[in-house]
Image: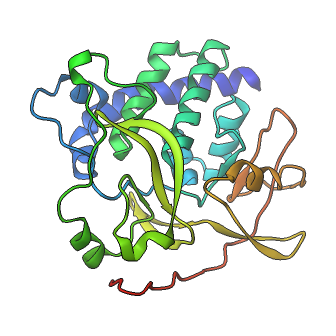
Protein backbone atom coordinates (compact mmCIF):
# COMPACT_ATOMS: atom_id res chain seq x y z
CA UNK A 1 0.00 0.00 0.00
CA UNK A 2 2.86 2.35 0.88
CA UNK A 3 4.53 1.49 -2.41
CA UNK A 4 1.29 2.19 -4.28
CA UNK A 5 0.94 5.56 -2.56
CA UNK A 6 4.51 6.42 -3.62
CA UNK A 7 3.79 5.45 -7.20
CA UNK A 8 0.53 7.39 -7.27
CA UNK A 9 2.18 10.49 -5.81
CA UNK A 10 5.06 10.12 -8.27
CA UNK A 11 2.68 9.91 -11.21
CA UNK A 12 0.92 13.01 -9.98
CA UNK A 13 4.05 15.11 -9.55
CA UNK A 14 5.35 14.11 -12.97
CA UNK A 15 1.97 14.93 -14.52
CA UNK A 16 1.88 18.24 -12.66
CA UNK A 17 5.27 19.29 -13.99
CA UNK A 18 4.22 18.44 -17.56
CA UNK A 19 0.61 19.62 -17.46
CA UNK A 20 0.92 22.81 -15.44
CA UNK A 21 3.88 24.16 -17.42
CA UNK A 22 1.92 24.75 -20.65
CA UNK A 23 -0.95 26.17 -18.57
CA UNK A 24 0.96 29.41 -18.03
CA UNK A 25 -1.63 31.41 -19.95
CA UNK A 26 -4.24 30.29 -17.43
CA UNK A 27 -1.88 31.18 -14.60
CA UNK A 28 -1.43 34.66 -16.05
CA UNK A 29 -5.17 35.18 -15.84
CA UNK A 30 -5.04 34.23 -12.16
CA UNK A 31 -2.07 36.49 -11.47
CA UNK A 32 0.48 33.66 -11.58
CA UNK A 33 3.22 32.45 -13.88
CA UNK A 34 5.54 29.48 -14.08
CA UNK A 35 8.64 29.44 -11.93
CA UNK A 36 10.87 29.40 -15.02
CA UNK A 37 9.08 32.40 -16.52
CA UNK A 38 9.48 34.31 -13.26
CA UNK A 39 13.20 33.58 -13.14
CA UNK A 40 13.80 34.69 -16.73
CA UNK A 41 11.73 37.88 -16.59
CA UNK A 42 13.87 40.89 -17.52
CA UNK A 43 11.35 43.72 -17.24
CA UNK A 44 10.93 45.85 -14.13
CA UNK A 45 9.50 43.77 -11.32
CA UNK A 46 6.03 44.78 -10.13
CA UNK A 47 4.99 44.49 -6.51
CA UNK A 48 2.27 41.92 -5.71
CA UNK A 49 -1.37 43.09 -5.84
CA UNK A 50 -3.32 44.20 -2.76
CA UNK A 51 -5.19 40.93 -2.27
CA UNK A 52 -3.53 37.53 -2.01
CA UNK A 53 -5.17 34.74 -4.03
CA UNK A 54 -7.73 33.01 -1.81
CA UNK A 55 -7.22 29.27 -2.26
CA UNK A 56 -8.86 26.91 0.29
CA UNK A 57 -6.44 24.37 1.76
CA UNK A 58 -8.72 21.54 0.70
CA UNK A 59 -8.81 22.79 -2.88
CA UNK A 60 -5.03 23.17 -2.88
CA UNK A 61 -4.62 19.60 -1.62
CA UNK A 62 -7.05 18.29 -4.21
CA UNK A 63 -5.20 20.19 -6.93
CA UNK A 64 -2.04 18.33 -5.93
CA UNK A 65 -3.67 15.03 -6.83
CA UNK A 66 -6.48 16.18 -9.13
CA UNK A 67 -5.24 14.07 -12.05
CA UNK A 68 -6.24 11.03 -9.97
CA UNK A 69 -9.87 12.28 -9.93
CA UNK A 70 -10.35 11.59 -6.22
CA UNK A 71 -12.06 13.66 -3.53
CA UNK A 72 -10.46 16.29 -1.33
CA UNK A 73 -10.67 14.00 1.72
CA UNK A 74 -8.46 11.35 0.13
CA UNK A 75 -6.18 13.97 -1.39
CA UNK A 76 -5.39 15.37 2.06
CA UNK A 77 -5.01 11.90 3.56
CA UNK A 78 -2.65 10.80 0.81
CA UNK A 79 -0.47 13.89 1.16
CA UNK A 80 -0.46 13.58 4.95
CA UNK A 81 0.62 9.94 4.75
CA UNK A 82 3.68 11.12 2.83
CA UNK A 83 4.38 13.83 5.40
CA UNK A 84 3.20 16.65 3.13
CA UNK A 85 0.93 18.85 5.24
CA UNK A 86 0.88 21.97 7.40
CA UNK A 87 2.46 21.43 10.82
CA UNK A 88 -0.90 20.84 12.47
CA UNK A 89 -2.83 19.24 9.64
CA UNK A 90 -5.06 20.29 6.78
CA UNK A 91 -8.16 22.45 7.26
CA UNK A 92 -10.07 22.21 4.00
CA UNK A 93 -11.99 25.47 4.23
CA UNK A 94 -9.17 27.61 5.63
CA UNK A 95 -7.20 29.59 3.02
CA UNK A 96 -3.63 28.72 2.11
CA UNK A 97 -1.62 31.48 3.83
CA UNK A 98 2.04 32.31 3.11
CA UNK A 99 3.27 30.58 6.28
CA UNK A 100 1.20 27.46 5.53
CA UNK A 101 2.53 27.39 1.98
CA UNK A 102 6.11 27.40 3.27
CA UNK A 103 5.25 24.52 5.64
CA UNK A 104 3.81 22.52 2.74
CA UNK A 105 6.90 23.24 0.66
CA UNK A 106 9.11 22.04 3.51
CA UNK A 107 7.02 18.87 3.72
CA UNK A 108 7.40 18.19 -0.01
CA UNK A 109 11.19 18.49 0.17
CA UNK A 110 11.41 16.30 3.29
CA UNK A 111 9.16 13.67 1.70
CA UNK A 112 11.41 13.62 -1.35
CA UNK A 113 14.60 13.30 0.70
CA UNK A 114 13.07 10.52 2.82
CA UNK A 115 11.99 8.57 -0.25
CA UNK A 116 8.27 8.81 0.52
CA UNK A 117 7.77 10.00 -3.06
CA UNK A 118 9.77 8.82 -6.06
CA UNK A 119 10.74 12.30 -7.28
CA UNK A 120 14.11 13.75 -6.34
CA UNK A 121 14.34 17.04 -4.46
CA UNK A 122 14.70 19.13 -7.62
CA UNK A 123 11.77 17.48 -9.41
CA UNK A 124 9.47 17.74 -6.39
CA UNK A 125 10.43 21.35 -5.75
CA UNK A 126 9.87 22.25 -9.39
CA UNK A 127 6.45 20.58 -9.49
CA UNK A 128 5.31 22.51 -6.42
CA UNK A 129 6.84 25.77 -7.70
CA UNK A 130 4.89 25.49 -10.94
CA UNK A 131 1.69 24.71 -9.03
CA UNK A 132 2.21 27.80 -6.84
CA UNK A 133 2.79 29.94 -9.91
CA UNK A 134 -0.28 28.43 -11.61
CA UNK A 135 -2.41 29.46 -8.63
CA UNK A 136 -0.80 32.88 -8.26
CA UNK A 137 0.76 31.92 -4.91
CA UNK A 138 4.28 33.14 -5.71
CA UNK A 139 5.57 32.87 -2.15
CA UNK A 140 9.08 31.73 -1.21
CA UNK A 141 11.16 31.49 1.95
CA UNK A 142 14.34 32.78 0.31
CA UNK A 143 15.10 35.78 -1.93
CA UNK A 144 15.77 35.44 -5.67
CA UNK A 145 18.99 33.65 -6.55
CA UNK A 146 20.74 36.63 -8.14
CA UNK A 147 21.87 39.38 -5.78
CA UNK A 148 20.74 42.08 -8.20
CA UNK A 149 17.22 40.65 -8.08
CA UNK A 150 16.83 41.31 -4.36
CA UNK A 151 14.25 44.00 -3.76
CA UNK A 152 13.49 46.14 -0.76
CA UNK A 153 10.31 45.59 1.21
CA UNK A 154 7.35 46.52 -0.96
CA UNK A 155 5.30 49.63 -0.22
CA UNK A 156 1.48 49.70 -0.39
CA UNK A 157 0.40 50.28 -4.00
CA UNK A 158 -1.31 53.44 -5.14
CA UNK A 159 -5.11 53.31 -4.96
CA UNK A 160 -5.36 50.88 -2.04
CA UNK A 161 -8.23 52.91 -0.48
CA UNK A 162 -10.17 52.74 -3.73
CA UNK A 163 -9.58 48.98 -3.91
CA UNK A 164 -11.20 48.48 -0.49
CA UNK A 165 -14.10 50.81 -1.30
CA UNK A 166 -14.83 48.99 -4.54
CA UNK A 167 -14.10 45.37 -3.61
CA UNK A 168 -14.46 45.25 0.16
CA UNK A 169 -11.75 43.95 2.51
CA UNK A 170 -9.78 41.00 1.08
CA UNK A 171 -9.39 37.88 3.20
CA UNK A 172 -5.60 38.30 3.11
CA UNK A 173 -3.34 41.13 2.05
CA UNK A 174 0.36 41.84 1.88
CA UNK A 175 -0.11 45.49 2.85
CA UNK A 176 -1.45 47.38 5.90
CA UNK A 177 -5.19 47.97 5.36
CA UNK A 178 -6.62 51.51 5.31
CA UNK A 179 -7.28 52.95 8.76
CA UNK A 180 -11.06 52.26 8.85
CA UNK A 181 -10.29 48.55 8.41
CA UNK A 182 -7.40 48.19 10.89
CA UNK A 183 -9.38 46.44 13.63
CA UNK A 184 -10.76 43.88 11.20
CA UNK A 185 -7.31 42.40 10.54
CA UNK A 186 -4.74 40.37 12.44
CA UNK A 187 -1.05 40.77 11.67
CA UNK A 188 0.80 37.46 11.24
CA UNK A 189 4.58 37.90 11.57
CA UNK A 190 5.98 35.34 9.14
CA UNK A 191 8.79 36.52 6.81
CA UNK A 192 8.58 35.52 3.16
CA UNK A 193 9.29 36.71 -0.36
CA UNK A 194 6.62 37.27 -3.00
CA UNK A 195 7.40 38.15 -6.62
CA UNK A 196 10.89 39.25 -5.59
CA UNK A 197 9.73 41.52 -2.76
CA UNK A 198 10.31 40.91 0.94
CA UNK A 199 7.44 40.92 3.44
CA UNK A 200 7.88 40.53 7.19
CA UNK A 201 4.37 39.09 7.49
CA UNK A 202 0.83 39.41 6.17
CA UNK A 203 -2.62 40.60 7.25
CA UNK A 204 -5.68 38.33 7.47
CA UNK A 205 -9.26 39.05 8.50
CA UNK A 206 -10.06 38.08 12.08
CA UNK A 207 -13.50 36.87 11.02
CA UNK A 208 -14.47 35.63 7.56
CA UNK A 209 -16.86 33.27 5.80
CA UNK A 210 -17.02 33.61 2.04
CA UNK A 211 -17.55 31.68 -1.15
CA UNK A 212 -14.78 31.79 -3.73
CA UNK A 213 -14.63 30.40 -7.28
CA UNK A 214 -11.91 27.86 -7.93
CA UNK A 215 -11.73 26.23 -11.33
CA UNK A 216 -15.24 25.17 -12.29
CA UNK A 217 -16.45 24.94 -8.69
CA UNK A 218 -17.28 27.19 -5.76
CA UNK A 219 -15.67 26.74 -2.34
CA UNK A 220 -16.25 28.20 1.10
CA UNK A 221 -13.36 29.80 2.96
CA UNK A 222 -13.88 30.43 6.65
CA UNK A 223 -12.04 30.56 9.96
CA UNK A 224 -15.00 29.42 12.10
CA UNK A 225 -16.15 25.85 12.62
CA UNK A 226 -18.64 23.97 14.77
CA UNK A 227 -16.81 21.64 17.16
CA UNK A 228 -19.16 18.69 17.87
CA UNK A 229 -17.69 17.55 21.21
CA UNK A 230 -17.99 20.86 23.05
CA UNK A 231 -20.90 21.90 20.80
CA UNK A 232 -19.51 25.35 20.25
CA UNK A 233 -18.18 27.39 17.38
CA UNK A 234 -14.39 27.68 17.44
CA UNK A 235 -12.13 30.02 15.54
CA UNK A 236 -8.88 29.25 13.78
CA UNK A 237 -6.70 32.01 15.16
CA UNK A 238 -4.25 33.08 12.45
CA UNK A 239 -1.52 33.82 15.00
CA UNK A 240 -2.15 31.00 17.49
CA UNK A 241 -3.32 28.56 14.83
CA UNK A 242 -1.17 25.61 15.99
CA UNK A 243 -2.94 25.66 19.38
CA UNK A 244 -6.37 25.98 17.81
CA UNK A 245 -5.67 23.18 15.34
CA UNK A 246 -4.12 20.76 17.80
CA UNK A 247 -7.19 20.90 20.06
CA UNK A 248 -8.88 18.58 17.54
CA UNK A 249 -5.94 16.21 17.22
CA UNK A 250 -7.13 13.64 19.77
CA UNK A 251 -10.64 13.24 18.40
CA UNK A 252 -11.34 10.06 16.50
CA UNK A 253 -13.10 10.06 13.18
CA UNK A 254 -14.38 7.01 11.32
CA UNK A 255 -14.67 8.97 8.08
CA UNK A 256 -12.00 11.34 6.72
CA UNK A 257 -13.12 14.90 7.37
CA UNK A 258 -13.28 17.53 4.64
CA UNK A 259 -12.66 20.21 7.26
CA UNK A 260 -9.52 19.12 9.08
CA UNK A 261 -6.87 16.43 8.74
CA UNK A 262 -4.06 15.79 11.18
CA UNK A 263 -1.06 13.53 10.80
CA UNK A 264 -2.06 10.04 9.69
CA UNK A 265 1.38 8.70 10.54
CA UNK A 266 0.94 9.75 14.17
CA UNK A 267 -2.54 8.27 14.40
CA UNK A 268 -4.08 11.72 14.75
CA UNK A 269 -7.27 12.76 13.03
CA UNK A 270 -9.98 15.30 13.56
CA UNK A 271 -13.51 15.99 12.51
CA UNK A 272 -15.58 19.14 12.20
CA UNK A 273 -19.07 19.77 10.92
CA UNK A 274 -20.11 22.32 8.36
CA UNK A 275 -19.00 25.84 9.27
CA UNK A 276 -21.41 28.40 10.66
CA UNK A 277 -21.57 31.66 8.68
CA UNK A 278 -20.44 34.76 10.53
CA UNK A 279 -20.96 37.91 8.46
CA UNK A 280 -18.36 40.55 9.14
CA UNK A 281 -19.40 43.85 10.70
CA UNK A 282 -18.89 47.04 8.74
CA UNK A 283 -16.50 49.39 10.60
CA UNK A 284 -17.15 53.07 10.96
CA UNK A 285 -16.02 54.90 7.85
CA UNK A 286 -15.72 51.73 5.77
CA UNK A 287 -17.61 51.16 2.55
CA UNK A 288 -18.35 48.05 0.46
In the visual, does 137 lie left or right of 10?
left
Answer above or below: position of 66 versus 255.
Answer: above
Identity of the residue drawn at 34% across and 58% down: 51
Q: Quadrant of the C terminus?
A: bottom left
Between 146 and 218, the residue placed more toward the observer is 146
Identity of the residue drawn at 11% across and 26% down: 42
Task: Residue 234: give x, y in percent of width and height.
Answer: 74, 69
Identity of the residue drawn at 64% across and 32% down: 84
In the picture as drawn, the residue positioned furthest to the front comes out as: 179
Way the structure is coloured: rainbow
In the visual, does 163 lie left or right of 219?
left
Task: Residue 167: give x, y in percent of width and height.
Answer: 30, 74
Task: Residue 111: give x, y in percent of width and height.
Answer: 64, 21
Between 152 and 58, the residue placed more toward the observer is 152
In the visual, does 225 lie left or right of 223?
right
Is residue 117 among what the camera can see?
no
Task: Residue 168: give x, y in percent of width and height.
Answer: 35, 76
Question: Where on the picture, by quarter, is residue 7?
Answer: top right
In the visual, does 165 lie left or right of 215?
left
Is residue 222 among what the camera can see?
yes
Amino acid sequence: MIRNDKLILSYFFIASALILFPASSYGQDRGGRTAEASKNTNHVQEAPPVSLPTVPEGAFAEELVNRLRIGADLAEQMLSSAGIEPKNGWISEYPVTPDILLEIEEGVIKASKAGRIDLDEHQAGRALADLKAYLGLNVAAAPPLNAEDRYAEASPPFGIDEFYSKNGPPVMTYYPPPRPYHEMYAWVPSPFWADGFFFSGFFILRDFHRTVPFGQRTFVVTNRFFEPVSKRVVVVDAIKRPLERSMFAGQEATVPSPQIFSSVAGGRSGRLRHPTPFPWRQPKGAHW
